[in-house]
Image (cartoon, helix red, strand yellow):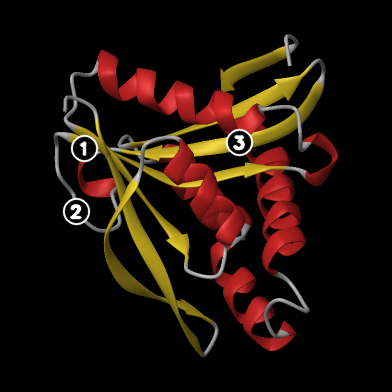
Amino acid sequence: MDNIQIVPVQISDADSLLQLSLSTFLDFFGPPVNEQKNIDAYTSIAFTPEKILSELMNPDSRFYFARDGEEIAGYIKLNFNAAQNEFKDPQALEIERIYVSRAHHKKQIGSQLINFAINTALNKKMDYIWLGVWEHNHRAISFYERNGFRLVGRHNFMLGDDVQTDLLMRRELYP
């Protein structure tokens, strides 16, 4: 845990980010959790070099790697302003993605990434942080609840032709 560093992802890291994004997504949401045809349909759009590059170049989005020594252990994607998927509130920060590779679980990297996001929002004097999490990802929901996030709504998420429900969770920064 002491060796974890959170560093900005650079444009030159696009291939590494793409590989990590795809592998962690498949680890946690691939078959048998979801049908292969829906995974293929979603990943063929969401995880392409062009898509990752456009996300990296968006001035209202920031990616950060969690490095364990020289290894990339996980990452977080933060969205501000118009890059947010739901609320688009200039006083809010969205955590769009937070993924830690299986090999690095139990190292408290997720907690460090959440704390990094909270500190980022506090430094920018934002009012709250929010995120969407799949309703069947009970482990993640519990993790977010332990970190002060509460359910505030729901929205549909299309995984191929499967309509899924994401829970919208929010953490107030100034209670």
The x and y percentages for residue 25 are 67, 59
Task: Give the left or right position of residue 32, taking residue 114 as reference.
Answer: right
* Most foreground residue, 14 or 117: 117
Query: N-terminal of the two: label 1 or label 3?
Result: 3
Task: Give the left or right position of residue 21, taking residue 95 as reference.
Answer: right
On residue 112, the disc is none
Task: Give the left or right position of residue 87, taking residue 171 as reference.
Answer: left
The x and y percentages for residue 53 are 53, 46
Q: Locate residue 117: give its quadrant.
A: top left
Amino acid of disc 2:
Phe
Amino acid of disc 3:
Tyr
Within 10 angstroms of label 1, few (less than 14), some, or many (20 or more) residues?
many
Query: N-terminal of the two: label 2 or label 3?
Result: 3
Task: Give the left or right position of residue 10, taking residue 163 as reference.
Answer: right
* Most foreground residue, 166 or 19: 166
Q: CA distance from mark 1 to mark 2?
A: 8 Å
On residue 87, the disc is 2
The x and y percentages for residue 26 are 73, 63
Q: CA distance from mark 2 to mark 3?
A: 22 Å
Q: Locate residue 137: give its quadrant.
A: bottom right
The x and y percentages for residue 35 are 70, 85
Q: Which residue is mark 1?
A: 92
Tell me what residue is drawn at x 77 percent, y 77 percent: 31
Query: N-terminal of the two: label 1 or label 2?
Result: 2
Q: Which residue is mark 3?
A: 75
Within 10 angstroms of label 3, few (less than 14), some, or many (20 or more) residues?
many
| Residue 131 in view here | yes
Q: CA distance from mark 1 to mark 3?
A: 20 Å
Tell me what residue is drawn at x 76 percent, y 34 percent: 106
Residue most extreme to the top: 2
| Residue 10 in view here | no
Tell me what residue is drawn at x 44 percent, y 35 percent: 147
